[in-house]
Image (cartoon, rainbow, N blue to C red):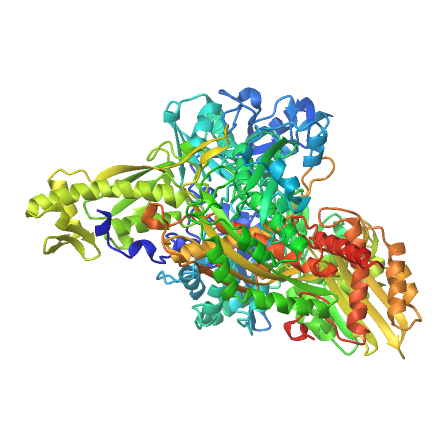
């Protein structure tokens, strides 16, 4: 049937389905929903110590505070005091006798107003007995290296033998910081108790099914009793994949214990103190290469600060390994993860899911080679890029890279943005400018698409056609701004030939589509698009059979298009066909289902095909750094990104632009600072700085690559676009590195860690000047 | 004496009795009025999701200001016209040109920050002389954070909407002017609510009297600082005195002698006059808060709160500013630097208030620079802030005023570095002497904004930048943020 599909609708730059609601303030987020009568408000009380025994928890003053209805502690939990996303029972909802990080919920106050609850929380008296706290990667290693998850090793060839045999060898370490999601809408949930054990929960969650499961687990009730719904989130970025669960559980718990509808909406500071963030990493690397810059062997250990519990740290650190090759072929390789336990927030999913951290390490290795050989880093990148169909196409996890376009994209972008000419100009500029230096870098991204947990790669949808010809679509994916719902509307438009206004997306709801996967891993459109298409096709097939029989034409002569339903030589109105089908007692509703083919992965052997395909891109950034203060400015950025046959080029460009700026934020100005006592000191936008309007590149050219369609059979041959462009931010880090390298005349690789804050840049500049002095012998 | 707060919300005249002195505009809009289009993103005036427009009548002209509703108190709206996102669409459903451009150009993704952006954009369109340059737009949007789009499509929408011609508010000017005029009754406002009392005095004399009667009353001008005491620290304020609209504290007087800025003058209002007085302040003034913060926060409030990291004091101390304080009927004037005694302690009696600050007109022998170094260039608190001023007579430094923020527990001058410069020719040797002496002046702290090492190193390097810009024989590029036209010297 697919050859009969009308073209167009699925690759149009349609506006965001909620755009008009957004700009009018009419798009409802959790806290905007109409409040049920008797609503109560929940505010958690957080630990103020990183690691301590709770000697005494006195909550009498809290209970006695005005408008307080109830104080909840772990003892009040009817089910299990656990919200561990992976089911390993290592993450309590409320701490009991020991707190494991500063910011951990110890109790929760339920009051008639949110303000009353916030005031009451401060009246708690907690007596702690401090225990040794392990806060950093280095401290965790020194303390014996307790892991939250098994370490993963990927091995191909004999790196241990190849490295010493290489003509050249460099080793070193690169650190990169974590990142707060800073979704503009903080964590929020509204729980409304129903009859008997029933509960409806509106939650700002990327994973309604898991939120449902966690609530059931904590309340000790069955999944059938709980319905979780989310129409949209005010941003997610991975921060609402598991982190939405504890607030939703607290709201549900309050609703059960008081019998009233209960709402939780975390204050920004509480949100940032409580919830996990992107993992910070320390990567130790060792690379062997020849005089042409061609890699012979790589060995890396990727250590991550995971926080106090596993959460998703296992798959996150796995994915760091999956991307520690970025776009490059390593003939001999061994990669090892080290997911370390620390007494800090439990780090979690964040756009890229460990992948960007692996890629930063890969690009550092490239820089080492470039500075050691004196080659243009771009040439080192081109020489080491995977070549599909050659003997240089096997990943460290033994998957064949069948679709590599890295070289093509890098070459085209270098040409389009005059990389080589500008690189020469910049070197001239740097000779003439003692206080401001410029740098340029062109980096690729190759990003594996699919959940590495294979069973997550499934999706469901539910489509209803009503007798007036309007269509209601529901699927398991959640909308957090990425335009998923818009794309799903386009899938229906294309499959049925309908205009936009006939297709309505409704809130994601576990009662409509059950057992869904998180909207994560860039998979939202890939998985749900196919499920929606499956549902639509089922109904379309029934309609086709019905009209073909009714009009006495072969089914092949029935087609759904913008003009209506073509039946032989006749064109019928879609609504008339639907009405007639209804009268003939044809079902106009269907569920749909999809599972990604081809994929498998065995962590025990480190082998498999974890990814259905790869998404590619390349970015070229030029920066200026200030040698008096370390301040940096992104002067110009050119990006070429591969979205396959884009479902919606406007939305995909928006994803690329936004992801890039977010990636640059991670690697430059966003810095999480904990003090020596393990208290996060950057817990609000006054201290944690995400990029602002003036931080966007002065010149910013973003284009979608015209490399055509996805060679795999994805939804209309598109490619996932959520996470891959986040990695383009790495080009800015490498450009800063290039600018710093000018200080010792490009003779050594700058030891630049991320985030490259002004302070980090100034520190590294001083180190480069020191090197220059000692090299020049004066 | 009036017992209510009166203002226009859209086309409705609001009269609130029994309003708590610390009820924020955001909570009132969302919880009391059910206007839930205005969002809470941070509750501390930093993300802009709560941006609303406050229109005031100033000298028969309307001034449209974007402000953060989360750290404004309802009482501060007295006499104003307020618009929220709900007012932007025309009654017939037609989108405002800003809204239309934002939808068409994909300026929203998750949509949560969008209402705040729209309000800042609409307010910017109404600023006299609003242009479509990137720098001007960046400045207008510096108080709004977006985590999804990377800003590019929002800037495109701003540009397109600027070209779209007049909006429907254009025609409402006369109506709003007359509405606001009618609200001006010259009456003291006092309201006793369960949560506390609020007073809006009509004059500086009346304010002095209120403070004499209740020295514990909290003075609030723009609330960009006190707002956080309420929203974040949950402090109880039994009596709040709002001074932001007291006419005789709203003077901004530029004379031959200098500039006097009354206690109720906001940064936005003072900006132009300060730039005339000392053009070298321009870029640092622009980087004090974001536009919504500068629209509310006052110059004198930035001084009176005594913060060691306020950006105003170092600039103004370097400019030789004098502070006028008043207690009862008695006024006194002190050098600004003398106001800051130690961390959290200023030279102000409980019943005394800051009346104004005076900045003398610099003579042609003075060279001046203001430098701000912060993690993010816009809307950020400084790691190091410098106000640097030298009087040169026949090439010799006859007076040095090197004032710093972020280097000590108060904004203060660098006595050793100043002494090292006094009487010397402003040459490289003098620079080196000042750089060396600066380590005698300060032992800065390490915190989440910067390490002690960085603060000291940057402070010394800012002296170098000052020298390079004012004394170096060859023009040289000294900053990545320098104006494009001087970038390639």
- Give the image location of residue B333, x and y in percent: 83, 64
Total numbered labels placed on residues in the image:
0
| A672 to the left or right of A469 | right
- Residue at 59 percent of width and 67 percent of height: A422
| B109 to the left or right of B331 | left
- Give the image location of residue B400, x and y in percent: 87, 68
- Residue at 24 percent of width and 54 percent of height: A6
Answer above or below: position of A706 versus A543.
below
- Quadrant of the rendered image containing residue B423: bottom right
Answer above or below: position of A542 versus A690.
above
Residue B115 visible in the displayed image: no
- Give the image location of residue A383, x and y in percent: 54, 53
- Residue at 36 percent of width and 26 percent of height: A224
Residue at the left extreme of this rendering: A552
Residue at the right extreme of this rendering: B423
- Quadrant of the rendered image containing residue A338: top right
Residue A382 visible in the displayed image: yes
- Considering depth in this image, is B82 or A243 the residue closer to the camera? A243
- Quadrant of the rendered image containing residue B464: bottom right
- Give the image location of residue A658, x and y in percent: 50, 54
Quadrant of the image containing the C terminus of chain A: bottom right
């Amino acid at each position: 049937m697919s050859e009969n599909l009308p073209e167009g609708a699925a690759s149009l730059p349609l506006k965001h389905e909620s755009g008009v609601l957004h700009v009018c303030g009419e798009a409802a987020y959790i806290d905007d929903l109409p409040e049920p009568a008797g609503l109560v408000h929940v505010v958690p009380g957080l630990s103020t110590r990183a690691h301590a025994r709770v000697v005494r928890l006195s909550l009498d003053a809290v209970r006695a505070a005005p408008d307080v209805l109830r104080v909840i502690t772990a003892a009040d939990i009817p089910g299990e005091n656990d919200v561990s996303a992976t089911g390993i029972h290592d993450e309590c909802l409320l701490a009991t006798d020991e707190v494991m990080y500063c910011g951990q919920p110890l109790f929760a106050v339920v009051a008639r107003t949110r303000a009353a609850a916030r005031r009451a929380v401060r009246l708690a008296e907690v007596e702690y007995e401090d225990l040794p706290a392990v806060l950093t990667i280095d401290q965790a290693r020194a303390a014996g290296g307790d892991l939250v998850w098994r370490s993963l090793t990927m091995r191909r060839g004999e790196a241990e033998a190849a490295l010493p045999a290489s003509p050249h060898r460099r080793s070193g370490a690169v650190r990169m910081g974590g990142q707060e999601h800073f979704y503009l809408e903080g964590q929020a949930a509204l729980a409304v108790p129903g009859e008997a054990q029933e509960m409806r929960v509106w939650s700002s969650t990327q994973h309604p099914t898991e939120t449902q499961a966690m609530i059931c687990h904590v309340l000790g009730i069955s999944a059938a009793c709980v319905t979780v719904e989310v129409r949209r989130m005010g941003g997610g970025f991975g921060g609402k994949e598991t982190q939405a669960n504890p607030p939703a559980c607290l709201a549900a718990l309050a609703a059960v214990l008081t019998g009233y509808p209960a709402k939780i909406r975390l204050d920004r500071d509480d949100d940032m103190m409580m919830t996990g963030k992107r993992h910070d990493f320390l990567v130790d690397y060792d690379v062997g290469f020849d005089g042409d810059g061609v890699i012979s062997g790589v060995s890396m250990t990727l250590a991550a600060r995971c926080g106090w519990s596993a959460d998703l740290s296992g798959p996150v650190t796995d994915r760091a390994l999956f991307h520690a090759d970025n776009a490059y072929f390593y003939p001999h390789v061994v990669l090892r993860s080290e997911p370390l336990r620390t007494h800090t927030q439990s780090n979690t999913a964040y756009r890229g899911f460990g992948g960007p951290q692996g890629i930063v390490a890969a690009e550092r290795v490239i820089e080492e080679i470039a500075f050691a050989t004196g080659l243009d880093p771009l040439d080192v990148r081109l020489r080491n890029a995977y070549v599909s169909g050659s003997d240089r196409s096997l990943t460290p996890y033994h998957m064949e890279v069948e679709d590599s376009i890295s070289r093509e994209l890098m070459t085209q972008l270098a040409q389009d943005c005059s990389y080589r000419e500008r690189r020469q100009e910049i070197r001239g500029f740097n000779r003439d400018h003692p206080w401001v230096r410029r740098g340029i870098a062109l980096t690729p991204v190759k990003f594996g698409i699919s959940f590495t947990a294979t069973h997550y790669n499934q999706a469901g949808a539910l489509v209803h056609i009503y007798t007036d010809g309007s269509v209601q679509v529901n699927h398991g994916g959640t909308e957090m701004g990425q335009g998923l719902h818009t794309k799903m509307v386009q899938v229906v438009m294309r499959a049925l030939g309908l205009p936009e206004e006939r297709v309505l997306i409704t809130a994601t709801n576990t009662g409509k589509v059950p057992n869904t996967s998180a909207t994560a891993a860039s998979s939202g459109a890939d998985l749900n698009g196919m499920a929606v298409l499956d549902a639509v096709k089922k109904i379309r097939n029934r309609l086709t059979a019905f009209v073909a029989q009714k009009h006495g034409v072969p089914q092949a002569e029935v087609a759904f298009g913008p003009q209506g339903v073509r039946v032989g030589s006749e064109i019928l109105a879609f609504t008339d066909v639907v009405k007639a089908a209804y009268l003939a007692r044809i079902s106009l509703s269907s569920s749909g289902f999809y599972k990604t083919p081809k994929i498998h992965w065995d962590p025990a052997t480190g082998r498999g095909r974890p990814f259905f395909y790869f998404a590619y891109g390349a970015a070229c950034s030029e920066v200026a750094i200030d040698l008096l203060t370390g301040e940096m400015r992104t002067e110009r950025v050119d990006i070429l990104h591969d979205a396959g046959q884009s479902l919606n080029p406007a939305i995909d460009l928006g994803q690329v632009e936004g992801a890039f700026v977010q990636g640059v934020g991670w690697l430059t100005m966003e810095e999480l600072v904990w003090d020596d006592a393990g208290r996060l000191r950057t817990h609000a936008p006054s201290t944690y700085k995400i990029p602002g309007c003036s931080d966007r590149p002065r010149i910013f050219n973003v284009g979608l690559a015209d490399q055509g369609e996805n060679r795999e059979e994805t939804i209309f041959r598109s490619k996932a676009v959520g996470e891959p462009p986040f990695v383009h931010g790495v080009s800015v880090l490498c450009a800063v590195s290039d600018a710093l390298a000018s200080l010792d005349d490009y003779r050594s690789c700058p030891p630049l860690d991320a985030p490259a804050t002004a302070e980090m840049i100034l520190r590294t500049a001083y180190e480069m000047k020191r090197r220059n002095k000692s090299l020049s012998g004066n | 004496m009036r017992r209510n707060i009166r203002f226009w919300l859209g086309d409705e005249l609001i009269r609130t009795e029994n309003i708590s002195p610390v009820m924020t505009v955001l909570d009132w809009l969302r919880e009391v009025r059910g206007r839930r289009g205005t969002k809470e993103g941070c509750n501390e005036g930093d993300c802009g999701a709560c941006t609303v427009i406050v229109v005031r009548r100033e000298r028969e002209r309307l001034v449209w200001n974007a402000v953060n509703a989360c750290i404004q108190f309802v009482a501060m709206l007295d006499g104003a016209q307020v618009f929220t996102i709900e007012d932007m669409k025309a009654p017939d459903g037609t989108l405002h040109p800003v809204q239309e451009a934002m939808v068409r150009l994909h300026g929203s993704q998750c949509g949560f920050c969008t209402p705040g952006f729209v309000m800042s954009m609409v307010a910017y369109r109404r600023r006299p002389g609003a242009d479509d340059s990137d720098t001007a737009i960046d400045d207008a949007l510096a108080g709004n954070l977006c985590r999804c789009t990377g800003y590019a499509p929002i800037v495109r929408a701003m540009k397109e909407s600027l070209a779209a011609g007049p909006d429907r508010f254009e025609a409402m000017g006369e109506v709003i002017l007359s509405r606001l005029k009618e609200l001006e009754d010259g009456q003291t406002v006092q309201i006793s609510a369960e949560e506390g009392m609020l007073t809006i005095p009509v004059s500086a004399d009346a304010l002095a009297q209120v403070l004499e009667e209740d020295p514990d009353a909290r003075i609030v001008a723009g609330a960009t600082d006190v707002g956080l005491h309420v929203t974040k620290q949950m402090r109880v304020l039994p009596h709040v005195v709002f001074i932001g609209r007291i006419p005789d504290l709203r003077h901004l007087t530029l004379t031959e002698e200098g500039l006097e800025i009354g206690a109720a003058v906001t940064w936005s209002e003072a900006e132009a006059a300060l730039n005339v007085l000392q053009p070298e302040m321009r870029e640092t003034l622009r980087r004090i808060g974001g536009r919504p913060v500068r629209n509310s926060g006052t110059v004198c409030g930035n001084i009176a709160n005594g913060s060691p990291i306020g950006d105003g004091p170092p600039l103004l101390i370097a400019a030789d500013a004098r502070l006028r304080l008043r207690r009862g009927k008695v006024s006194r004037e002190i050098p600004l630097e003398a106001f800051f005694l130690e961390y959290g302690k200023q030279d102000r009696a409980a019943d005394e208030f800051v009346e104004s600050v005076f900045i003398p007109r610099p003579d042609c022998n003075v060279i001046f620079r203001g430098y701000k170094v912060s993690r993010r260039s816009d809307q950020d608190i400084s790691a190091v802030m410098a106000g640097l001023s030298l009087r040169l007579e026949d090439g010799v430094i006859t007076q040095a005023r090197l004032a710093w923020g972020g280097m000590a527990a108060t904004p203060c001058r660098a006595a050793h570095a100043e002494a090292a410069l006094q009487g010397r020719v402003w040459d490289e040797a003098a620079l080196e002497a000042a750089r060396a002496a600066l380590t005698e002046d300060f032992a800065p702290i390490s915190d989440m904004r910067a390490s002690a090492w960085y603060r000291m190193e940057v402070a010394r390097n800012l002296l170098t930048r000052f020298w390079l810009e004012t004394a170096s024989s060859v023009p040289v590029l000294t900053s990545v943020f320098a104006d494009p036209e001087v970038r390639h010297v």
